[in-house]
Amino acid sequence: MQKYMLSLKAQNELAFFNNGLLFEIFSFQQLICYLFVRLCFQFYIYLQKMLPAINNTHIMNIKWLIGAISVGLFISCENVKEAQTVSNSYPSVFPDYTFTAIPYNIAPLNFEVKGAQEIRADFAGEGVNLLTVTGKHEIRIPKKKWKEMLDKLKDKDLEVTVSVWNSSSPEGVRYKPFTVRVASDAIDEWIAYRLIEPGYEGWNMLGIYQRNLTSFEEKEIATNRADKSKCMNCHSFANYSPQQMIFHVRGEGGGTALWKDGELSKLPLETTGPKKSGTYPMWHPNGRYIVFSSNLTRQSFLSEGEKALEVYDLQSDLILYDIQTKKVLTDKRFMDEAHWETFPAWSADGKSLYYCGALPKNMPIDYQNLHYSLCKVDFDEATGTFGERIDTIYNAERDGGSVSFPRLSPDGHYLLYTKAACATFPIWHKEADLKMLRLSDGEELDVEILNSAETESYHSWSSNGRWILFSSRRLDGRYTRLFIAWMDEKGNIHKPFLLPQSTVEHNVLRTKSYNIPEFIKGEVTLPQKQLNALFFPQK
């Protein structure tokens, strides 16, 4: 008999009820089984209505008897097919989750096999089969069963065996099993990111969103729905807190928004100049200071070469905002037009500021000769002042390339950054890769497992320093998607995996790019009415 499957939504939502009898339905292999069980419960309801004289004890006995029969039928009717051919190769699954490492609290890794008409996936741990899931074109794993399975396999391997049936292999092919390492290092439950069209278009509909990594829940934080002429970007959080957030709104009436302890306000950063704004913010670990790069940004379309456009700065300085005194602090060295500074980042202890610095060039004509070095300066949090000495950690003028997005691990041991051939923004540079320095000795570590032939750019660390979140164009060369990689306690980085989605097609049908991904420890509850009143007033 032909196999029938309920949709994932039906699987998750359909349950039998009545006086405490509740069990989740994960799959039906035969439609007749489902119909028979429905009939059984209708019979039970009939007994309740038509035989009131029967005492409650008898009714309960009948109920549980029907339930037991039904469960047995589910099991007996599944009749899962067995593939007749065994392959010595690994399955070509999308997304590519083969031989990755994942946190035990991540959402299910749903996947597909191209060309499959029927799929079976057997999940095992330590030689014991824990779960079998079937599907037509993709595998959608029940969230509850997935969580139970990963909880059992902390610091162990999950073995996945995939079988496929299609017109060329009607008897089925069982592929060589692959493994997924289940790390006991938890990942922060939430991330925040911006969704935006990848280029050329106007700002149209864009915003800052948040996603629960333990499920597929996605929510808005702030969007430009009320005024599509404005751009929203450059969000940052204080110590991963959803209650302390900052972001920038570009456009007429825009500015820098501060969300702190339940209050939303606009920061007085006008002293930096009318043509500049507070962008690329980074919150000091003590929560008192926020450092910004104050930039005058433009983009140009290119008529030659493979690249279509280049985004660049005409000016860029560093400014410091003191939340306690509500004052903008500046250092003349970082406001000098003879030198550009951008992409600031604090050390884990807050005693140093890292940033990218370059000698100005004639932009955009000379953008290929613009090279940002990685610099460091001491910081005194008691006075809000910077030290006299500026160290160059990576000299781009001497060693080549251009550095952007320095981010330090929470333990202070590592510095992760993006390196491109030139200029300020790596997002349209195919050669842009992630690089990492060990700060104890300045040694550059091998992190090629994170990179691809396409662009890698924005990145961040989890609060425990074990997970790296970054954007990449590796799927199609156009849209940036989010990838996650594990850095174990020995400093080894494992193969990254694509952000899991409820359906595989979501990875290719969403026509937005992800950028500025940030880990947060909880859900952001920004008051939309206050946001609109400050930045999107009705005209």
Image (cartoon, helix red, strand yellow):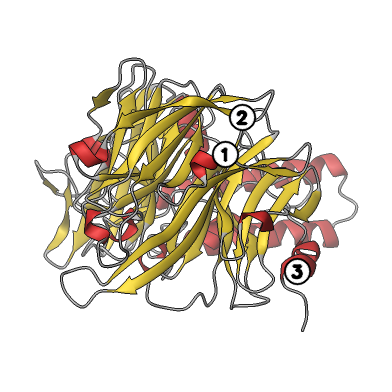
Residue 378 or 306: which is nearer the viewer?
378
Which numbered dot is residue 532?
3
| Image quadrant in which you'd find residue 188 | top right
Identify the residue under disc 1. Answer: 331
Rounded to the nearest angstrom, the CA distance separating label 2 from label 3 is 35 Å
Figure quadrant of the N terminus: bottom left
335 horizontally vs 456: left or right: right
**Labelled pair 3, 1 in contact (Cβ < 8 Å):** no
**Labelled pair 1, 2 in contact (Cβ < 8 Å):** yes
450 lies above or below 269: above
Which circle's residue, 3 or 1, is located before the other in the chain?
1
Which circle's residue, 2 or 3, is located before the other in the chain?
2
Identify the residue under disc 2. Answer: 385
Which one is closest to the eye, mark 2 or mark 3? 2
Mark 3 residue type: Asn
Around disc 1, counting alpha carbons within 10 Å, would you say few (fewer than 14), some (14 to 19), or many (20 or more)?
Answer: few
Residue 7 or 275: which is nearer the viewer?
275
Residue at position x 80%, y 62% from top?
530
Rounded to the nearest angstrom, the CA distance separating label 3 from label 1 is 34 Å
Task: Name the residue furthest left.
Answer: 88
Indicate the position of residue 387 as horizontal and vertical percent values. 53, 25
| Image quadrant in which you'd find residue 434 | top left
Which numbered dot is residue 434?
none
Indicate the position of residue 383 as horizontal and vertical percent values. 68, 26
Figure quadrant of the C terminus: bottom right
Which circle's residue, 1 or 2, is located before the other in the chain?
1
